[in-house]
Amino acid sequence: MKWLVLLCLTMPLQVLAQSKTVLPSDLSIEVSVEDGTEARFTHEMILLTIRGVYRRHITREQLIQPDFDGFSWAQLGPDNWSEERINGRKFKVLTRRMAIYPVRPGALTIGRFTHQLTLTDESDDWFEHEIQSEPLTIDVTEAPATTNWWFPVRNLKISDQWSNAPDQLSPGEGVLRVIRLEALGATPEMIPPMPDLQSPSAMIFAHPEKRLVELTPEGPVTYAFWRWTIRPTNDVSGIVEPLQFSYFDTVAREERAVTISAQRIAYGSVSGKAKSAVSQLAPLPSAARLPSWPAAVLAVVVFVAVVGLGLSGRRLTGLGALQRFGMFDPLARRLRRFARKGQAAGLRQAATAMARRDGLTQQRLDLIRDFDRRYFDPKSDEPNLMRFARLFLRAGLKQ
């Protein structure tokens, strides 16, 4: 008996809820602009929230958006359906987030969003019904004139990363520099072009930049990566000049300048830290001792022989020739070994050490420059290590 009473009490409500008569309080949809008090600039992100509230059972639905004349747009993820209690009653709620970008100034109107719904009546039959949002007008101002790239963004994060310590490089070694930009509210095409990194005393090879985008409820987040390979050209050190660009902070409504400071790059053997470390770790010299009498006699004999050969007009050239002969030269053996193993960095270090010992001729300098260009430039062919070693050793024999 109790269940029958309950059924009789609930049946009128069910019939009323699923009748063919749709009350305005049953279904509604509206569009709102986040932080819509300020006048917007062209190409600045504007966040829209489309919110629908429904008290009827929905069998099928389709939300149709307007043409967005004067705007480019992006939907920030799929539609979100949830349940909320409003004034003590349960409602189904639809939420859609969108980012729109005005492409021209003026009073731009966002047309009506139309939600096409399939509802049920008292007989459980389906019927079509639609609701619409009110049009929305946004005042847009032309972006302020600037000599730099117009870059409006809600939030910008920048990091400057190096593959290893730029002032502690091994001889002949290069370093990879990566500047990472994380821009909230910007699409990939809004990021400024990759700047031209300059240095009066370093060789710089630019890599193709990468741009990725992630859609979040707060707007698109674009990641840009600017990459360069850098190496000192004078085998000592170099200075990479600072980078500068600007962006417009759409939250604070002001222009901001970004300066990425200059950076010194150097080989570890000439950096101040390396020198101080060597001086601290160098062992103290042992106490001096006079040689015993056999060593003194041998020294006298060698001295007399050298003086005699000098007076006769002859020169001792055998030791120098022996050092230049590849079989006995340790640096030449290292050079060939690295070439056979395909270790370009070790080969470059051995070549630098030979050039410092024997003196850098023009032919060897040209070989090293061609090697560096092929090794560091991603667009060039890889250097032939065996050919480089052969020509480098041959150039040393001709000097």
Image (cartoon, rainbow, N blue to C red):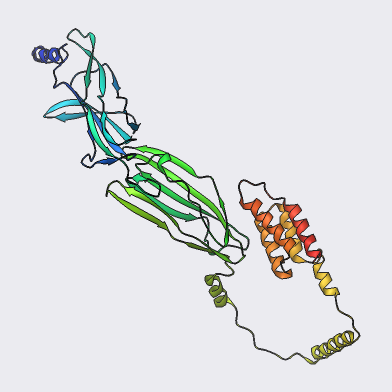
Q: Quadrant of residue 105?
A: top left
Q: Residue at x 75, y 57 (%)?
A: 389
Q: Residue at x 83, y 70 (%)?
A: 322
Whether residue 140 sits left or right of residue 325 in the image: it is left
Nearer to the camera, 209 or 197: 197
The percent position of residue 97, horizontal first and vertical second, equals: 29, 33
Q: Is residue 276 above or below residue 197?
A: below
The percent position of residue 191, horizontal first and vertical second, equals: 42, 44
Q: Quadrant of residue 76?
A: top left
Q: The N terminus lies in which quarter of the figure?
A: top left
Q: The C terminus lies in which quarter of the figure?
A: bottom right
The percent position of residue 25, horizontal first and vertical second, equals: 13, 22
Whether residue 229 sits left or right of residue 33 in the image: it is right
Farthest right residue? 312
Nearer to the camera, 398 or 94: 398
The percent position of residue 201, horizontal first and vertical second, equals: 57, 62
Q: Quadrant of residue 274?
A: bottom right
